[in-house]
Amino acid sequence: MGRRRPEAHRCEPAFAASWTGNIVSVSSSVFASIVVMIAMDGYIVAQPGLYRAEVRKLLPRTSAGRVEMTARHISVSLKLWCIGQAIQMLLVGALTALAVWLIGLPSPLALGVVAGLAEFIPYLGPLIAAIPALLVATSQGWSLLAWTVLAYVAIQQIEGNLLLPMIQRRLVAIPPAVILFGILAVGAFFGLQGVVFAAPITVMVYAAIEKQASGKAAGACAYQ
């Protein structure tokens, strides 16, 4: 029995290193997907008319007008959502960098950038952003780890109770249940990386349904 204990102790660092490596690998893949998705959204938002014109060529003339109006509503909704997300990402990234700097963790700017990028994913983003900070804090001691947990929880509360309501009130408002359902649905089909694409897809689908519903309501009122 005494001979096996050193082997067990040697296995613990190896297991921890493997576990940490897996987390870093998954996080890197997710953040790469976030960067790609942000770039794609930027191209669509910058030139929405170009994509609407190409789609219109594929449609019959009888339905081109209705589809054009729906596509315009989708592009406006996606643009407003992207503006709101950009504001939220900048504010959360700045708050995180400041908090991490005050705590005394190394690389506060990098951790702030990670937190800002992760905000692109609603609900799951803050959890993903906390992983690198917690790993860094763990190596610095239990005291810094506790302060880091408190800081990230406080930032999450500020975001949920102050930033998010203000942004949604002035830009585009989508029910939280709709976003959460979209994340779960896309994640179930495409895995963790697919979650990165869930929010923009949900915004576009919700905007299309909203436009169709408003069009039917307007048609019913005109008929009456």
Image: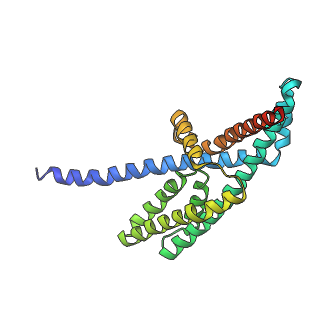
Residue in view at x 53 percent, y 73 percent: 101
Please name whichever residue, 44 or 183, is drawn nearer the observer in this view of the structure.
183
Residue 177: % across, % down? 56, 46
Q: Is residue 82 above or below residue 222?
A: below
Query: What residue is at 76 percent from the left and 37 percent from the top?
Result: 217
Task: Give the residue furthest to the bottom.
Answer: 102
Q: Position of residue 147 (x, y in %)?
A: 43, 71
Left or right: residue 71 compared with residue 137:
right
Would residue 110 be visible to someone looking at this image? no
Q: Is residue 121 above or below residue 101?
A: above
Rendering quarter of residue 52: top right
Residue at the spot 55% in from the left edge and 35% down from the top edge:
190
Number of disc labels: 0
Residue at 54 percent across and 33 percent down: it is 189
- Where residue 208 sits: x, y (%)? 72, 37
- Pinpoint residue 93: horizontal percent, then vertical percent: 60, 64
What residue occupies the far right of the structure in this picture? 61
